[in-house]
Every structure is written in C-alpha cells, then in structure tokens.
Amino acid sequence: MAPLLIALPLGLGALAWIARDRRISRAALLGTAAVFLAAVAAWWAGAGRGDSGGGLAAYLSVDAIGLVFLTIMALVFAAAAVASLAYFKEQGLSPRREAAYTAQLLFFAAAMAGVMLARHLALFWVLLEATTLTSALLIYFEKKKSSLEAAWKYVFICSVGIALAFVGIIILTVGSRGINSLFFTELARRAGEINPFWLKMAFAFILVGFGTKIGVAPIHAWLPDAHSEAPAPVSALLSGALLNSSFLGLVRFQAIMIRAGLGGFSDFLLILTGFLSLVVAAAFLLQTVNYKRMLAYSSIENMGILFLGLAFGPAGFFAALLHSAAHSLAKASLFLTSGEILRLYGSKRIDDVRGLLRREPRIGWVWIVSFLAVAGFPPFPAFLSKILLIGAFFAAGSGWLTGPFLALIVVIVFGMGGAVFRMAFGEPPAPAAAERSGLLSYGPQVLLLILLLAIGLSIPAKVLALMREAVGLLN
C-alpha cells in the first residue's frame, strides 16, 4: 500500500496536467485526499504495515512514528485540498492554471508521503529534496515579485541545508563502514559499532541540514517569506506537514545517537536550538506587521518546542508528538483562515484588518479559536503537550528550564494574541464587503478544530497506544 501513496498522486497529477480539465483537476485533488485518509485509516485499523517485508517494502513502508506523521499529513492535506476549491473560485483560475496548481500540489504530496514512508537514509534525503523542488513552484504560483523572491530564497537556503545533510550522510558512511547499510533500523540496531567521532560529526551536519528545512533558528530565514507568499492552502501544507517530514528525519537520527550512547551530545544541541528558536520567535512576534509572517514565526516557535521534546527522552518525545499534531492542525486552520482574511481585506498587514468578527463572524471566530488552539489554551492538546514537556524537564533533573520556557511562551502568546484580537475586534474599515464566506472557506478549519478539541478532552486509546509505540523508537 505504501508505494501507492506516492504513485497515485504522481499519476493523478500528471493526468491533471495533461487533461487541463477543471473537473479532472478537482477530482484528482479530492481523490488523492480520500486515498490518503483511507490508507491511514486502514493502517490504524490493523492492516499490515509491511515494515517487516523485503524488496520495495524494505525501502518504503510505514512504522509507528511514520504513521503518526502520515496521519497528520493526510488530515492537513484533506483540509488543504477542500480549501483549494475555494481558492480556485476566489482567484478565478482558468482550467489550465487549476491543472498546474493541482499537478504541483499532488507532486508535493507524493514527495512528502515518500519522506514519511522512507526507511532508508539516502532515499529519505532524495525525497526530502524533492519536497523542496515541488513546493517551490507552489510558492511562486501567484507569480508576484515577492513570491519569486520567496521561492528563490527557499530553494537556495534549503538546497544548501540539504547539501549539508548529504555531507552528514557521507560522514556517517565513513564512520560506519562495518555496517555497510543506510537503513534506519540497521543503523539504530548496530549504532554501537559506529565510530563516535564520525557519528557526532554526522549528527552536527544532519542537524543543520534537516534543521534548515524544519525552519528552526538561526537557519530559518526562508520560512517567513515562503509561508507568507504561498497561497493559503499551500502555506497550510508547508507549516502543517512539510516541517514534520523534515523533523521525522531528525527523530530517526536521534534514535541512532541514543543507541550509540551519544544522546548527551545530541540532546545539548537540540536544547540549544530549541530555545534559540523560542527566543527568535518571541522577538519577531512582538513586532511583526504581517499576519501571515506572524503565523510563520509561530511555526518557528513550535518547531523549537519539538526540538526540546526530542531532547528529553521518551517522556519529552511523547509530548513532542502530541504537540506536533496540535500545532499542525491548528496552524493549518490559521493559514487557511488567513487566506480568507486576505480575500476580505485585500491586505496582509495586521493594521489594515479590523472588525473581523463584525465583517464575517464565522471567519472571525475560526481565527480566534485557531489561535487559542495553537497557543495552548485548555482544553486544546497544545496545553497538555506543554505540561508534559515541563514534566519531562523535571524528570530529567532540568526543572530550572521551566522558568525561561514559560517566560518565552508568555511573550509569544502576548505578541501573537495582541495581533489576533486587534484584527478580530473593533470597527471594520468601510465599505464592508457584501460577499460572505462560503462553506469551503471555513468548513475544513472547523473540522480540524473539532478534532483538536476531541483529542484535548480525551485522547483515544488507539492514539495513545500508537504514540507509545512511536516513542519506543527512542528506547
């Protein structure tokens, strides 16, 4: 089943590109979303994951950690696919432009699915680079000068990062000559045989390489531009799914470091990067004037939290997995809503948006509730994940980190919340738009928020079991 999740969007994307028919493009988008959801549902229901087979399954199959991130991606992609229909209507795209958008989005989805299914380090690297190339076209889709600059910066910085990750893989190969394999499971099983010096060097390069794609500070320069210039459904995918796919590579490498007895080295670098990301996000969120860039800086903050979770053993990693789901769904909702705000007000400036609740109450409330979800207000799961992370600090004897962690979170929530509420309340600028938002403009966000509420109120037993199985990767 795993290879189908790559082949199908590639095939349907090519079909949409060739046919250039509006109905085929839309059917391809929604059909791919349905297949992704059906596949993860089948795996959740107990269908064989194929991770113990040989041949192609050895390279492409889903394990517990891969299924967690693939499920998140399937949900975000489904929301983005539905929201894309509203985007087509708002932009008045021709069948040819719709076909181009659909093909690029499906190629991007295929690459992301491949990253989450890849069980071989070299294959993972190739597919991760493929996500850069396919998503760059989407960032430039609206063909503005600013989007061209954002796409170019994205390709350049991420390509440099991915090249550094490649250097890390070469260094790992030098240090693991006796193993003669780049399968993640084999590297983790025989991690003790890898030369510690070369493994530390490899991790440093991998951290910078994959970290560039994750968008953590100080290697985040591409992220605010790319996320703010892409069409709203693409921004939702970039933040809610792409960042996770790069983070998955780092998780798999961290498992190798822990099994090699070098967890202390990698933990220190992860904590340093995590806190630096929080500091940078806090500084920019207090002064940003563009609400899409504000959401991008929030992504940097949340990736920093994932880094912290990864550094604090199984308890911290459990918190990171929960936080990843909470951030992805909430941030996708925020980015999709930002597209509708842009349509209503015609500006990305925070100061130009006032009275959103009066002008379009449904969009206003979705905007506010999505913010509460991503900021970690109870009962949303981001609240629980942060509590669990603080618990992991104390369990590891690093409870003193709670102070700076909470201080930075307070600054970030203050900065972001101030902008969100200024946009939501007050008098809308006249004249108000006569057109109301359609169901496709807010329906996907409402479903994502309901799902988040359900998880926050009571995490289903199956979800808990899968997350615990995924956490076992670091044991």
Image (cartoon, grey):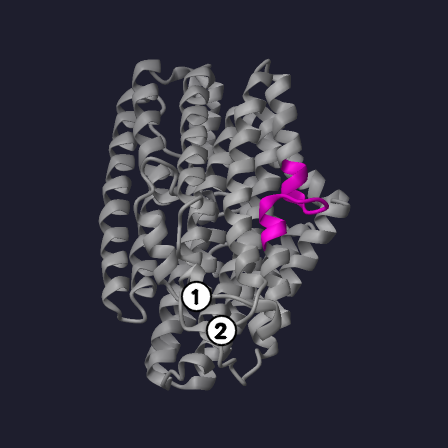
Q: Nearer the viewer, residue 350 or 68?
A: 350
For the residues bearing labels 1 and 2, Cβ distance under 8 angstroms: yes
Residue 352 circle label: 1
User: In the rendered picture of this protein, how many numbered marks are placed on residues?
Assistant: 2
The Cα atoms of the two marked residues, 1 and 2, are separated by: 8 Å
Whether the magenta-drawn stretch holds residue 351 is answered as: no
Residue 269 spot, x, y in % from top left: 40, 23
Of label 1 and label 2, which has the lower sequence position?
1
Q: Which residue is mark 2?
A: 429
Quarter-of-image position of residue 145:
bottom left
Helix, strand or loop at label 1? It is helix
**Image quadrant occupied by the C terminus:** top right
- The type of residue carrying mark 1 is Asp
Q: Which mark is residue 146?
A: none
* Magenta region: 371-385
Q: Camera-side residue: 383 or 69?
A: 383
Residue positioned 61% across, 68% down in the render: 357
Location of residue 211 in the rendering, given as x and y in whole percent from the top left corner:
37, 37
Q: Foreground residue, 173 or 236?
A: 236
Q: Is residue 131 above or below residue 139?
A: above
Residue 66 in the image: above or below residue 172? below
Residue 390 shows up from this direction: yes
Q: Which part of the image, by quadrant, shows the N terminus?
A: bottom right
Q: Secondary structure at mark 2?
A: loop
